[in-house]
Amino acid sequence: MIEDGNGFDIEVIYYSNAIDFLAENDPSLHESLEIASEYGYQAYNLNSEILASLLASKLVRDEFYELESEINDFFEDLEEE
C-alpha cells in the first residue's frame, strides 16, 4: 500500500539541498545515476534535484524493508490485544 501510494517518494528541492545530499550520500553519483538509468532517464533529463530525489527515495524504501518484519510484528501484536 505504501509503495502504491507513492509513500516512499521523497522530493529533494533546491539545488543546494540536492548537492549537499548527494555529496553526503553518493559523492561519485554512481548509485544515483544507476537508479536513474533503471527508471529510464536519459542524461540530458537529469539534474541534481532528480538524482537526489531518486536516491533519497531508494534509501527510505531500503530502510523500510529492513524494518518490515518488525513493523509487521508490531501491528500483529496490536491486533492480538
Image: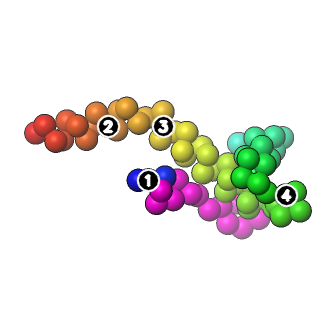
Residue drawn at the location 46% of the way across and 60% of the way down: 5
**Residues at discs 2 and 3 in contact (Cβ within 8 Å):** no
Can residue 30 be seen at all in this image of the molecule?
Answer: yes
Q: Residue furthest bottom?
A: 14
Q: Secondary structure at mark 2?
A: helix
- Distance between mark 4 and mark 2 Cα atoms: 38 Å
Amino acid type shown at disc 3: Tyr
**Residues at discs 1 and 3 in contact (Cβ within 8 Å):** no
Q: Nearer the viewer, residue 6 or 21?
A: 6
Residue 74 inside the magenta-drawn segment: no
Q: Residue furthest right?
A: 44
Residue corresponding to mark 3:
65
- Distance between mark 2 and mark 3 Cα atoms: 11 Å
Amino acid type shown at disc 2: Asn
- Distance between mark 4 and mark 1 Cα atoms: 27 Å
User: Quick one: label 4 or label 2, which is nearer the N terminus?
Assistant: 4
- Residue 44's quadrant in the figure? bottom right
Residue corresponding to mark 2:
72
